[in-house]
Structure formats: structure tokens, C-alpha cells
Image: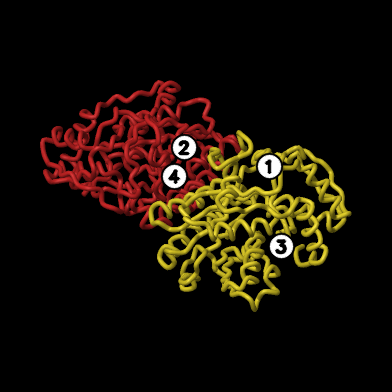
Chain colours: A red, B yellow
């Protein structure tokens, strides 16, 4: 099993689960400074899996390691929306260039493997109907969304043209242990959690936007289910999870669960408002019906686990 | 007036028209070896316009030349579908990386200019309804289509986020003087024209596919109309032109008009069939109604002009 972006948030949780289940796991990660990668995420798993630092744009750094893997869990990417606007070229490198080189390398060395790609609800842009199903038009509102859309299309294309066994999961806001909480680059919720654990103040912008969330263990379940899905025909699936809440309700629950911190409601800063998507919640019935996947964690339970983790390991993540 | 890709097929015809009308024209072109650029295309216009060889990915090569232009006619790009499959990274560089760097440079140095982007019907993929209007789903069938889709989305995004005055034209098969005829990289029709002028044999793959075509002077008219369109709000428009014909009918007319050459009907080679889009013809009423644009050339007249051009200048293009 190969996990790209395996030092990152969801990638590391997935790699740990796979290794715990006895799989032979190879983690590739470029350790981009502003990304989700954190060596701490796999510190206690060094003897249970293999790690190679590699920039996916340079196939020569990793292609000899490809043969033999049954599944490529492809979670490498740059996730910050605002960074994609201030540095669109870096986002293109991480989210598009890296992906086409990886797919080409897999086509040459690992043509039979399943490839499960971590896509994102960001490619829908500002939804025009709810809940958002997979037929909703794609109208990304930032460079990150455009680039992730292109990468997802590559995965579907490589099935249609080359018969590669690809599946893409359009993830929504995912949270849990090992997410980046140093700042809001992973998601706004990362910084909220940090502030709550530090007993500080966090800002809720707007507050009335509705979002669904996925606890990371449920996201890991979804990747495993996608890795077992047959046939794998380039299809794309929404992954939702916890029923939608407003950001104000989410902030309130976080404060209650942590028993610390408080929040202030603020107007949306202009540079964020222009790339904000408003409400989002997914219709993920297609994936549920085909795989039997269903979330196991409530919002409260997910937040409880997350807060407990950062209370113990805060210094590793700030 | 700035014309990127201005040594290429449509770009050079546009640059010539602008210069003939007395405009101050700067042409940028990277002179990619397998692209449409040909120094011959502007050989007789060297005193009438300025040219800078520049790779759009390197803003430092051209950004000091940007201020002052009223319109950027943005025709730079890699157009070969099959090359995009055999070398997807180069296609990404030319069609996406170059575009985001250019847009960023325009945002910094030329925020008020109109930017008219040469998009393509390729981003629709294999159409599911006819004629294809701008609301047709985007489902590109090759890497080139995915990359052009991303670049078009950047142009619309830069209007929504930064207020830049962008317009995109989704072109269909365009033909005429100064197209690449050395091989089929520009379009299949380029090679057909070469063979007809050489009194040789060309291959028609399939032959029943319907396509609309645009004669290059009509395409130039469309770019000029788009350059004058107000307001420019990131919108996208189909450009069609000549009513659809089957490829067999097109081949027959070419042979008749040129009075030379002949064709053979062949099965589609597998590596092309898997990225073929089948029929395509555009509904371009939206652009016609907003600008008054309409094609002036019939298929026969366009072919006649084209054949006459290559009878005179064949050695410059083969």
C-alpha cells in the first residue's frame, strides 16, 4: 500500500490504520513547509512502515518503489485556498504537476493498481442546490479548486484512456488528530481547535454558513472502502458525514466540548469573502450505497477526541 | 495591443489584421518547436509590429512590456491532442502554467486591460447534445482538454476575484493561411491541405463525424469583436461559423477546390479513437447576438483561399 502525502493530516491517519492492520505501507511525502505534513504524525510508527521524502513532480525520486503496491492512496496536495491565490504557481505544482507525473509513473510501473485520489468539495464552488450531489456543476471559486478539479479529471481520464483503476473522493471539511492547527491553512477549524485548547479566543467569520464535517477516522474508513470498491472505473464520490451545522453552532460545540476558549463573530475579511463558497453539505448516498460506508462519529464525539489529542500533543503542532 | 502566441496560426493572422489597422502591436511567442509558431507568419510584417520571444512562464522576460496595452489577445498554447497524451507535462507547462503566470503579470501591470483568451471546444469532450451551447457539461477527453479547461477557468476566476476584464472564446476547428500543415498537430485538416496541395493522398479517419469549421478571417473577426465587447465579465462564448459537414464531405470539397490530391477512408487508429470526440458543432448564437459577429466565409471560399495560399508558400510550411 502506498500513501502519498502520508505525513499529512488524513494521509498519516490512513497510513497508521493500514500499518496497524498489518499492511506493508510506503509513505511518500514532499514535506512542503506550509502544508499539512508533520514528521510527528508518524514518529511512533517508524518501525511499522517505510517512508521516502519525495517530490511527486520528480518521478525518478520514487518510481523504483512503485511496483507491487495494490492500492495507491493519493492524498498529496496543497490545501490552503488563500495560499493558492497568493502563490498560484506553487499550488499548480503541488496539485496538478505532481499529479500528472504520479499518474504517468503509475501507468508505467503500476498499471494494475487501484488509485484513490483525495479530491475536494471545493471544485463545486458556491453551490446552487442542496444537498450537493456528484452531478452538481463544477464552478471552483479559487485557484486551488480549479487545480484540484484538473487533477481529479486526470484520474478519471486515465481510467477512460488507459483503463487505470481510479476512484476520486470529494472530501468536505475533515477534522481530527494530526491536522495542522498552527494556522488556518488546513481549514479554519484547525486554528479554532488550537485556540480552544490554548484557552484563547478564535474568530468565527460570518457564522451562518452551513457545513458538513467528517471526522478523520470516518474519512479513513471511506478511503479503505474506496480502495476495496470494484469495479474502479474513474468514478467520483462525495464524502460527507456529520449532518450540517452552522459555523456558529460548530464554534459553540467546540467551546462546550473543550471546556475552554471562547469565540468572537466577525465580518468576513474581503480577501477571504471573495473566495468563500457559502453553504455546503454533501449528498453522499451514492458512495454509501455502493460501499456500505457510514460515519461512526458524531460531531461531539469527534471534537472530544480531537481536543483530547491536542491537549496531550499541543507543542508538537504549534 | 498584445498578442500572445502571435507567431502561431490564428495569432499571426490577428496580429497582421491589427497592424494593418494601424494598431501598436506587440507579439509574444515562445516559438515552441512542435507548436503552431512559424517566423514566416510575420516575416513581411517586421516593420509594422514588435516581437519579443518569451516563455510566458517567465514573467521577467516580458512583464516590463505589459503596461499600456488596452487588449491582450491571449492565443498562446499547445494545441496537439495527441502530444498532450504522450507528453502531458509539456502541455501543462504551455497551457496552464504559462497562463497563470501571464494572468498574474497582467493583474500586477495591466489590471484594466481586456484579456481575450483562446479556449477550445475540446473542453466539452464528447458532446451529449447538439448543437453544443455554453451550458453543455465539460468532460474533456484528453489532457489538453483538461488543461485548457483549467486555463479558461483561471480567466473567469480572475474576473470574479480581481475584477479583471476577461472573455474566453471556445473555438472549433479553425483553418486558413498560416496554419501548421507540416503534420496533424494543429488539426487533421492541416495535413489534409498539405497533401492536397502536394497532389498526394490523405487519410480520412472514420469520415461520418460532423464538425463545424471556422475560417481564420472569421476567427480574427471574433477576437476583434470580443476585444470590443462590454462589459467583459469573465464570460465564455462558443465560436462556430460554417454549418457542420461530415469529414467525408469536407475531404471531398477540399479535393474539388484544390483540383488535386485524393483521400482514402481509414479506420480510426486506436490511440486517436480513445481521445476522439465524435460529432461536434457549436451553438454560437450567444456571441452573435451580443456582438453582431457572423462568419463571412463559406467553406468553399475558405478552402479556396487556403489552398491558394499554400500553393504559393508551400515550402515555408513543410
Q: For the residues labelled 3 and 2, say whether their Cβ atoms are less than 8 Å apart.
A: no
Label 2, on which residue? A137
Marking on residue B23 = none
Q: Residue at x 37, y 30 (%)?
A: A130
Dot 3 crowding, Cα within 10 Å, few <14, some 14–19, many 20+: many
Disc 2 element? loop
Disc 3 element? loop
Q: Please indicate whether residue A4 sits to the left or right of residue A247 in the image.
A: right
- Chain letter, disc 4 residue: A
Q: Between label 1 and label 3, give the one nearer the viewer.
A: 3
Disc 4 element? helix
Tell me residue B246's x, y (percent): 75, 41
Label 4, on which residue? A148
Q: For the residues labelled 4 and 1, say whether their Cβ atoms are less than 8 Å apart.
A: no
Tell me residue B242's x, y (percent): 71, 48
Work out how far the residue at label 1 is from the one at label 2, CA to CA, in angstroms: 30 Å
- Chain letter, disc 3 residue: B
Work out how far the residue at label 3 is from the one at label 2, CA to CA, in angstroms: 38 Å
Q: For the residues labelled 4 and 3, say whether their Cβ atoms are less than 8 Å apart.
A: no
Tell me residue B245's x, y (percent): 74, 42
Image quadrant for the N terminus of chain A?
top left
Q: For the residues labelled 1 and 2, say whether their Cβ atoms are less than 8 Å apart.
A: no
Q: Work out whether disc 4 and disc 1 sit on a shared chain.
A: no
Work out how far the residue at label 4 is from the one at label 1, CA to CA, in angstroms: 26 Å
Dot 4 crowding, Cα within 10 Å, few <14, some 14–19, many 20+: many
Q: How many marks?
A: 4
Work out how far the residue at label 4 is from the one at label 3, CA to CA, in angstroms: 36 Å
Query: Sequence order check: which comes first, mark 1 or mark 3?
Result: 3
Label 1, on which residue? B271
Query: Sequence order check: which comes first, mark 4 or mark 2?
Result: 2
Tell me residue A198's x, y (percent): 13, 45
Amino acid at each position: 500500500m502506498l500513501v502519498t502525502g502520508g505525513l499529512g493530516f488524513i494521509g498519516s491517519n490512513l497510513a497508521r490504520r493500514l500499518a496497524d492492520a498489518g499492511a506493508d505501507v510506503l509513505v511518500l511525502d514532499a514535506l512542503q513547509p506550509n502544508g499539512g505534513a508533520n514528521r510527528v504524525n508518524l514518529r511512533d510508527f517508524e518501525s511499522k512502515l517505510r517512508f521516502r521524502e519525495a517530490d511527486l513532480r520528480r518521478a525518478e525520486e520514487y518510481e523504483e518503489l512503485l511496483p507491487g503496491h495494490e492500492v495507491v492512496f493519493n492524498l498529496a496536495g496543497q490545501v490552503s485556498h488563500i495560499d493558492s491565490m497568493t502563490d498560484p504557481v506553487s499550488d499548480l505544482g503541488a496539485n496538478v504537476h505532481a499529479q500528472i507525473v504520479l499518474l504517468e509513473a503509475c501507468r508505467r510501473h503500476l498499471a494494475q493498481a487501484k488509485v484513490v485520489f483525495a479530491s475536494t468539495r471545493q471544485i463545486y464552488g458556491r453551490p446552487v442546490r442542496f444537498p450537493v450531489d456528484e452531478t452538481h456543476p463544477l464552478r471552483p471559486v479559487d485557484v486551488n479548486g480549479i487545480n484540484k478539479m484538473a487533477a481529479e479529471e486526470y484520474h478519471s481520464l486515465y481510467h477512460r484512456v488507459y483503463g487505470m483503476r481510479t476512484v476520486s473522493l470529494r472530501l468536505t471539511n475533515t477534522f481530527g488528530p494530526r491536522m495542522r492547527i498552527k494556522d488556518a491553512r488546513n481549514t479554519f477549524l484547525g486554528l479554532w481547535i488550537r485556540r480552544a485548547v490554548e484557552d484563547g479566543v478564535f474568530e468565527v467569520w460570518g457564522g451562518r454558513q452551513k457545513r458538513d464535517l467528517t471526522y478523520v477516522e470516518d474519512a479513513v474508513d471511506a478511503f479503505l472502502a474506496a480502495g476495496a470498491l470494484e469495479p474502479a472505473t474513474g468514478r467520483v464520490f462525495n464524502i460527507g458525514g456529520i449532518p450540517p451545522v452552522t459555523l456558529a453552532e460548530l464554534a459553540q460545540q467546540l467551546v462546550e466540548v473543550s471546556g475552554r476558549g471562547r469565540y468572537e463573530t466577525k465580518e468576513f475579511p474581503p480577501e477571504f469573502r471573495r473566495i468563500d463558497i457559502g453553504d455546503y453539505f454533501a449528498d453522499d448516498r451514492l458512495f454509501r450505497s455502493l460501499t456500505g460506508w457510514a460515519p461512526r462519529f458524531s460531531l461531539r464525539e469527534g471534537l472530544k477526541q480531537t481536543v483530547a489529542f491536542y491537549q496531550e500533543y499541543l507543542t508538537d503542532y504549534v
